[in-house]
């Protein structure tokens, strides 16, 4: 129990499903057996969510610093930030107040991690429109983390089961994404993919690189990015001793990765990587009209701190209705624990 890493779990956009899925995850005793979780958010919102879920066996411990946390199953530690006026609080709607709350929680989590007060950060979903309405012009968590940690080389990794995907670009237009497929960037992402696999305990990662164009360009018939940018980057990676191969046609590379041919896939843009992972992890029960599984996690690579997240949005349409699925949050917590323990062990060995 003494080697449990401290996890700072951000509340996310309070108007969405974040508070509910966090609490549902913390109702699982295994989370406390493996870690020391503390919610970073407004205790008024968390208390309202706890009442909604009607779990009388849990209570809230409001703290102003991490040292005051109890980290005991049955007690929800909340690092309180005064952010939400409950009289003006709205559920399931875009709101500048909720956007500001989500940002301040993330900012505080990053600061605590940089100060070594917590070992990993776990993020609940935020709403990009609310975030921007509050005056924070970011396209998502990844960009917030990169700027506040002063990180230049970073990337998003998604994971579900055997499938792990890291992206050359994410929150940009498709037209801009094509322009960002450059030799230097592709090589940097291959290296981030390698390091991520090593951090997860994979000793000799096999890295597959997707092409940008249909059929990976078909030797220049459908585009030349593979020839001019991607293949040289793969050669550079091989010269550094990395087991990288490709570029492979995007429509065949992902089934092979799911089957265990590769440890991780380098995707060229947002949807190329997101679609196969969410087809794998998101399962809708048409008969029951609900999601029976919402699996998959998001890790930001290249940061000086650990950030693991759910791989879904705020789901305003089902917010505060007691039906949100916490499986992705549990997976994000599990990844955060795993990465934190490996990082802590390495630090101790270096000492």
Image (cartoon, rainbow, N blue to C red):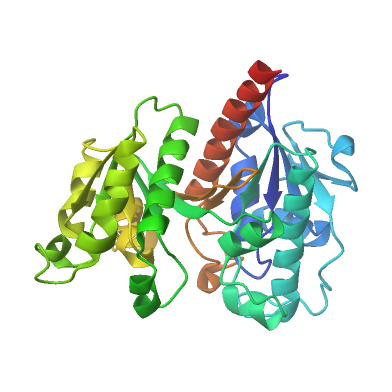
On the picture, is 271 further left or further right than 63?
A: left
On the picture, is 31 further left or further right than 73?
A: left
Q: Does residue 285 appear in the picture of this structure? A: no
Vertical arrangement, residue 281 with respect to residue 132, above or below: above
Vertical arrangement, residue 88 with respect to residue 311, above or below: below
Q: Nearer the viewer, residue 220 or 46?
A: 220
Which quadrant of the rendered structure holds the C terminus? top right
Tell me the residue at 73%/56% (across/down): 51
Q: Quadrant of residue 100?
A: bottom right
Tell me the residue at 45%/74% (across/down): 172
Q: Quadrant of residue 316?
A: bottom right
Residue 273 point in image, percent of width and height = 33, 58
On the picture, is 309 further left or further right than 276?
A: right
Tell me the residue at 66%/62% (across/down): 147
Residue 96 point in image, percent of width and height = 72, 80
Which quadrant of the rendered structure holds the N terminus? top right
Q: Quadrant of residue 83?
A: bottom right
Tell me the residue at 66%/19% (across/down): 350
Residue 344 point in image, percent of width and height = 65, 26
Residue 322 point in image, percent of width and height = 57, 59
Q: Does residue 132 appear in the picture of this structure? A: yes
Q: Nearer the viewer, residue 299 or 193?
A: 193
Q: How many marks?
A: 0
């Amino acid at each position: 129990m003494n080697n449990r890493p401290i996890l700072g779990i951000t509340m996310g956009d309070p108007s969405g499903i974040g508070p509910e899925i966090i609490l549902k995850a913390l109702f699982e005793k295994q989370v406390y057996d493996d870690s020391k979780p503390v919610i970073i958010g407004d205790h008024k919102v968390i208390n309202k969510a706890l009442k909604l879920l009607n779990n009388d066996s849990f209570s809230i411990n409001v703290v102003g610093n991490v040292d005051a946390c109890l980290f005991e199953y049955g007690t929800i530690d909340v690092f309180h930030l005064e952010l939400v006026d409950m009289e003006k609080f709205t559920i399931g709607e875009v709101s500048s107040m909720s956007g500001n709350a989500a940002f301040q929680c993330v900012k505080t989590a990053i600061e605590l991690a940089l100060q070594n007060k917590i070992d990993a950060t776990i993020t609940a979903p935020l709403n990009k429109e609310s975030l921007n309405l509050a005056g924070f012009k970011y396209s998502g968590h990844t960009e917030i983390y990169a700027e506040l940690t002063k990180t230049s080389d970073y990337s998003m990794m998604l994971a579900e089961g055997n499938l792990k995907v890291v992206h050359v670009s994410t929150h940009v237009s498709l037209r801009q994404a094509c322009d960002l497929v450059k030799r230097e960037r592709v090589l940097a992402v291959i290296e981030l993919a390698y390091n991520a696999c090593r951090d997860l305990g994979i000793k000799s990662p096999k890295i597959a690189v997707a092409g940008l164009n249909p059929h990976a360009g078909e030797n220049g018939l459908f585009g030349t990015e593979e020839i001019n940018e991607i293949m040289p980057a793969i050669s550079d990676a091989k010269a550094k001793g990395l087991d990288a191969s490709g570029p492979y046609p995007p429509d065949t590379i992902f089934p092979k990765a799911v089957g265990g041919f590769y440890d991780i896939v380098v995707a060229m843009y947002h949807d190329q990587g997101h679609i196969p992972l969410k087809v794998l992890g998101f399962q809708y029960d048409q008969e029951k009209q609900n999601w029976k599984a919402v699996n998959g996690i998001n890790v930001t690579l290249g940061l000086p701190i650990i950030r693991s997240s759910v791989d879904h949005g705020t789901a305003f349409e089902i917010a505060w209705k007691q039906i949100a699925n916490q499986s992705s949050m549990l997976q994000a917590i599990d990844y955060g624990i795993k990465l934190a323990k490996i990082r802590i062990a390495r630090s101790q060995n270096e000492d």
